[in-house]
Image (cartoon, rainbow, N blue to C red):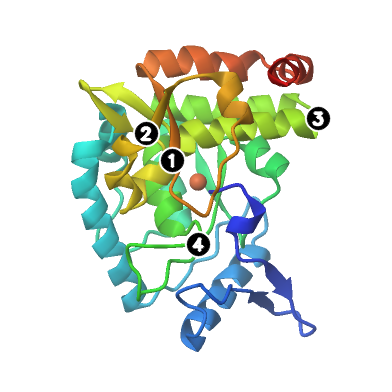
């Protein structure tokens, strides 16, 4: 999931207790009352979910399944060229359905035997501390809706394609899933907002938008790139910088555009050493000093 508040359509509870998702005018589904009703119904499922109980089933329409099938096939072709070997192996382990949207409960059932991760439904934005904290417990907050059918290869928000094709495939890898857990451990360990944001920015530039040298090429392992049909063709032409904790933790990013600054790990071991090692040991004091040093 993307972590920034402005990325998510806000949800509001109406006087009668029903949930309304407030789409921006520029959203491809803004003027489609059927889509708006779908979004409201799916958000209500997440709100009704009781932790520890099965995730409510979203009854997707044929049209929604068709969007998934189209994007899933298009991305799988791109992944062969642009995704890391570790990610591709993980997709083989997970074997997500290609022709229909899997339920989040089902995604957890596939993932848990592999790496222990399960999914939690989210209606929209999850506060940073909750989103990251539960990664330490092997839980991943995920939206359940799918993008509007008029723009199958584009979404302004993180939808189920991003959450599942992007993240669940990575979470099926022992090594990537360990990094997600370490990010969760780090988020639980720190108290200051500054430290939490620093950790979340490093997550953004690695597990969301990370690239690395792999098979002699620049390949992506970040869920944000690997779930974006447009971005996956562009990342090799971006401003690629060496992996640098302070730079990642303090670089501003614009979530409404393609990421034009990306950070490259030299290998998966390098990523684990630098970022995994940092998340395993960082605390408020260490992060405050790192931030202070750049000012
Ligand atoms: Fe994400």
Disc 4: residue Cβ within 8 A of ligand 1's nearest atom: no
SS at mark 1 in the image: loop
In percent of width and height, residue 161 lies at 39, 56
Q: Quadrant of the C terminus?
A: top right
The mark closer to the camera, 1 or 4, is 1
Work out whether mark 1 precedes mark 3 in sequence or the reverse, and give the earlier one.
3
**Distance from Cα at disc 3 to Cα at disc 4:** 31 Å
Work out whether mark 2 precedes mark 1 in sequence or the reverse, and give the earlier one.
2
SS at mark 4 in the image: loop
SS at mark 2 in the image: loop
In percent of width and height, residue 222 lies at 41, 37
Q: Which mark is residue 192?
A: 3
Q: Is residue 189 above or below residue 269?
A: below
Work out whether mark 1 precedes mark 4 in sequence or the reverse, and give the earlier one.
4
Work out whether mark 4 precedes mark 2 in sequence or the reverse, and give the earlier one.
4
Number of residue marks: 4
Q: Is residue 280 above or below residue 25?
A: above
> Which of these two is toward me, 40 or 78?
78
In percent of width and height, residue 260 lies at 43, 40
**Distance from Cα at disc 1 to Cα at disc 3:** 29 Å
Q: Is residue 58 above or below residue 161?
A: below
Which residue is label 1 attached to?
A: 260
Identify the residue at horizontal 76%, vertical 25% (top origin): 190
The mark closer to the camera, 4 or 2, is 2
Which residue is label 4 attached to?
A: 144
Q: Residues within 10 Å of mark 4 (few under 14, many from 20)?
A: many
Identify the residue at horizontal 43%, vertical 67% (top origin): 147
Identify the residue at horizontal 66%, vertical 77% (top origin): 20
Q: Which mark is residue 221?
A: 2
**Distance from Cα at disc 4 to Cα at disc 2:** 22 Å
């Amino acid at each position: 999931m993307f972590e920034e508040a402005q990325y998510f359509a806000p949800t509001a509870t109406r006087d009668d207790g029903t949930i309304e998702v407030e789409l921006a005018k520029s959203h491809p589904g803004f003027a489609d009352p059927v889509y708006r009703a779908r979004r409201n119904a799916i958000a209500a499922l997440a709100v009704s979910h009781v932790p520890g109980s099965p995730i409510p089933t979203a009854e997707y329409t044929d049209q929604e399944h068709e969007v998934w099938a189209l994007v899933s096939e298009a991305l799988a072709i791109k992944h062969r060229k642009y995704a890391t070997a570790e990610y591709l192996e993980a997709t083989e382990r997970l074997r997500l359905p290609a022709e229909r949207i899997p339920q989040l409960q089902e995604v957890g059932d596939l993932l848990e035997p592999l790496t222990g991760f399960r999914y939690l439904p989210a209606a929209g934005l999850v506060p940073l501390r909750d989103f990251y904290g539960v990664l330490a417990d092997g839980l991943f907050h995920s939206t359940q809706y799918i993008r509007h059918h008029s723009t199958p290869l584009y979404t302004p928000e993180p939808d189920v394609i991003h959450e599942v094709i992007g993240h669940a495939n990575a979470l099926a890898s022992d090594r990537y899933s360990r990094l997600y857990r370490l990010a969760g451990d780090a988020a639980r360990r720190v108290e200051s907002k500054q430290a939490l944001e620093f950790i979340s920015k490093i997550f953004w530039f690695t597990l969301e938008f990370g690239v690395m040298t792999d098979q002699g090429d620049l390949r992506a392992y970040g869920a944000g790139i690997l779930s974006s049909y447009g971005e996956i063709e562009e990342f090799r032409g971006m401003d690629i910088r060496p992996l640098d904790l302070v730079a990642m933790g303090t670089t501003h990013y614009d979530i409404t555009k393609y990421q034009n600054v990306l950070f490259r790990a030299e290998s998966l071991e390098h990523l684990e050493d630098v970022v995994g090692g940092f998340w395993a040991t960082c605390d408020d004091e260490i992060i405050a000093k790192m931030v202070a040093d750049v000012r």
